[in-house]
Image: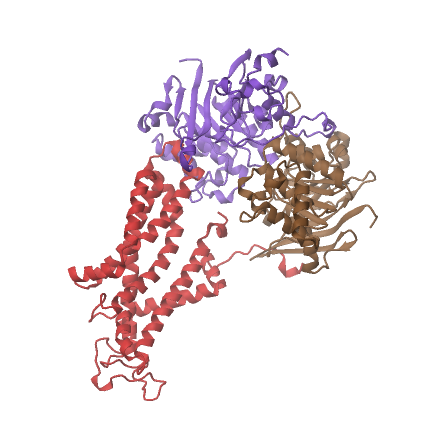
Chain colours: A red, B purple, C brown
Amino acid sequence: MKKNQVYCEKTHRVPRWLRSLWRSKTGLIGLLIVLTVTICAVFAPYIAPYSPSEMHPVDMLVPPFFSEGGSTRYLLGTDNLGYDILSRIIYGARVSLLIGVLSVVVAGVIGTLLGLLAGYYGGILDGIIMRITDAFHSIPRTLLALVAVVLMNGSLVTIIIVIGVTGWITYARLIRSEVLSLRQREFVKAAITIGTPDWQIITRHILPNVFSSFVVVSTLAVASSIIAETSLSFLGLGINPPDISWGFMLSIGRNYLSSHWWVATWPGIALTVTVLGIMFLGNWLRDYLDPHNQGL
Amino acid sequence: MGEYLLEVNHLSKYYKARGKGLAHANQLLRAVDDVSFKLRRGEVLGVVGESGCGKSTMGNTIIRLLEPDNGEIIFEGHDLAKMNRHELRKYRADIQMIFQDPFSSLDPRMHVFDIIAEPLRVHHTVSGKELEDRVLNLMEVVGLDASYAQRYPHEFSGGQRQRIGIARALALQPKLVICDEPVSALDVSIQAQILNLLEELKEKMQLTYIFIAHGLPSVKYISDRIAVMYLGRIVELADTKELFAHPLHPYTQGLLQAIPIPDPNLRKSDAERAIMGGDIPNAMKPPEGCYFHPRCPYATADCCNESVGGPPILTEVRPGHFVSCFHAKEFAEK
Amino acid sequence: MSSDVLLKVKNLNTYFKTENGLLQAVDQVTFQVRKGELLGIVGESGCGKSITSLSIMGLTAKNCVVEADSIAFENKELTTLSDKERRDLRGGDMAMIFQEPLTSLNPLFTIGYQLEEAIRCHNKISRSQASELAVAILEKVGIARAHEILHEYPNSLSGGMRQRIMIAMALVNDPSLLIADEPTTALDVTIQAQILQLIRNLMREFGTAVMFITHDLGVVAEIADRVMVMYAGQIVEEADVYDLFAHPYHPYTSGLMGSTIQVQQEKQVLQTIPGTVPSLTKMPKGCRFAPRCPYAAEACRVTMPELEELPDGRRIRCLRWKEKTHNG
């Protein structure tokens, strides 16, 4: 055994999660991407070169700066109405992140509550809740969005509710199965024999132990919400101008794919990179929070 | 108040089988089948048996973690089996349980202090400084250093976690403690520590134990009386000394023969060793008549006759010695 | 190597790779197994007995580093073998059975398939011949309806049956050494008795040597010829089974025996060994058992005792064993 490999407990000044992140290259990349997108969303007015609603009728369909005919004034080019694509992508991050996060909150609250009840009490309650999840599972999101848009207007709130209400199923199923297995753990049985009332068992014992799964699912759910919003906006059922959405940008760019590739490509790349970044981060988070890795 | 702390009469717990077709429709898994015994204050009743014998299920049913299908659980004169959850709550403090698995019987996200304090908090027994004193005192009583109070379960060894579980069970000063295989998952030297601790606590806090285990040695060490279970039924019940000196039920004899003795000079040759053959039968389809007859070296036609109409009943054949066997009287006379 | 020594292990060291360096799990383990004998390796959790056997078989996980001066099996040096040569040895001349047969048997394949696979891995014979051999070995291990069992899946069988099948799979290629890692720990006591009897009979019939790992002193007393006691990754004592139980020299050995419930005795005061096994990250300097030892002196806490070999064949790792045995 080499001398320098002798076991030596080091006291680290760097916190554990940071060290773990450093070791996981994809996790690090994910975090950087998410940070970048968040900064874009929060500081959009300070970062974007132009306002997203600033039209430049003179410079319509200008290619990106590295292409022939492009200019450094519009780094990623402009679209058919002369909007600067880069600025719109930066502002679009706001919408994506906002909708992604808030719809997850809606879905999370509904799904966790129902999953908890189904898993803990079982029996008829479980049966009813599971049948409800099956019913919701079969509702096409697009159809619901269409109905919602007709009934209410296609505002931010509407989209959040639509995605949230169709997305709670994953939570419910996951939380339910975690609770089912936790229910069988001896420490829950011990709490029952002590005489702890049900609501205390749920809040004190069950919830903290499903927390890490909840966090991991939430991270990944944000990614899928963003994709959902993009699809809806692409179909015109989501965000409408003056709000900017990558999905909306995609729907415009669709008509120019063969002639002016950049109009659709940049929002597409922004979407892909964002979702990938969230996935990487979510995967790292799942491994980090895994009880086995913590010696639990 | 009667002389018995606990009286269990004809306790049964069944599980319904889910099978295909009419043939399986009424199949019942008799996890606990017509179990009766009486427990005196300060006594340790050992319950021993192999897998599928129902000992753990019986323990869980007595404490109402599982609902009994039949029978009475009379604790200090009150039938626990018939109470609803609200009435039961008053008795929760009197009957506590120590669990088998030191790794899953403690909430991994709670401090040791909170784990032991939970029973006291739930019943609003004490609070503030008094609570703190009680918890630290309990830790001391089970041999845990008070400085460990803010640690998490995963920082302790199996034996220490079991001590935490014991402290939690004793927090409400119960009268009856059901020990469900408390030492099975521990190393031998730690088993000895915990067994000695349990004995000491029994004297100090005037407890009564039901000690469930699948290994006879630990049951022998700590129990005053032993009940041997097979496929949901008690097949023999006697004082510890009596059981080892005169085991009457063939299953008990087989069990005793099978225990490996830690002394090579007492090795038996294969001829002397009467190793019990066969496997434990499927609990869903127990044999006709006496459940044990397919493996029994003394079985006769009477034992499995349909006319017998069910397994034998636990009867007293010697003073304080109960056996469930059709030939019990003959064995007792030998 | 003399002709009756089957396995000779010299200075085996196994380490775990962690983010803080290498943790030693097995420390300078040296021992032999002779032909036809049963060596019992006894110790509690964390003593390194399982890792030792896995290291010898070459089955350690990726985060383990195994180093040894020599591991010689039937005069073949195992440390220099290629992976393929190691595989040929496994299941052939050197076989292993584990504690939990359910995880050792593949639930998706029939017993017959798995047995035949084990046979044909090491013998170039046809499937029908392998099938016959399978039936024969199943009957040898006491399974009555061997022909029917060939078509069953592991999940539908009891623990005892599965362990018998594991033993059959291990013995079907007539190994000279069987390593059994706590094979009866998960079984009921009556089934354990059957399996122990089976192992004894098979040893007599096939002449197989067995390395039997367990934490149960009773089991060791029942079947072992020689016993090796391990503590915190080291061998602390080794002796003939009768000698060891009559006169345990090492305080840990006598402590273990004192903590074991002697069912045959009327009354017993159970002794305990205070404290717990040291964690791998915080090994004491000097003798590893000193913090828990009733005989520990200052020298014990400073110097690590060497494993001494005594004229009667016993080995003992203790600075004060002479005084201890004179004082009883």
- Dividing the picture into quadrants, the one containing residue B88 is top left
- Dividing the picture into quadrants, the one containing residue C148 is top right
Q: Nearer the viewer, residue C72 or B206?
A: C72
Above/below status of B197 relative to A4? above
Residue B21: percent from left, percent from top:
41, 36
Above/below status of C78 relative to C287? below
Query: Residue A132 vs residue B170: left or right?
Result: left
Q: Residue at x 33, y 38 (%)?
A: A123
Query: Residue B146 vs residue A37: left or right?
Result: right
Q: Nearer the viewer, residue B25 or A210?
A: B25
Q: Residue furthest front?
A: C128
Q: Residue at x 34, y 84 (%)?
A: A65
Residue C296: percent from left, percent from top:
68, 38
- Quadrant for the N terminus of chain A, please: bottom right
Residue A251: percent from left, percent from top:
26, 73
- Dividing the picture into quadrants, the one containing residue C124 is bottom right
Q: Nearer the viewer, residue B56 or C248?
A: B56
Q: Is residue C230 visible?
A: no
Query: Residue A239 vs residue C306: left or right?
Result: left
Q: Is residue A215 visible?
A: yes
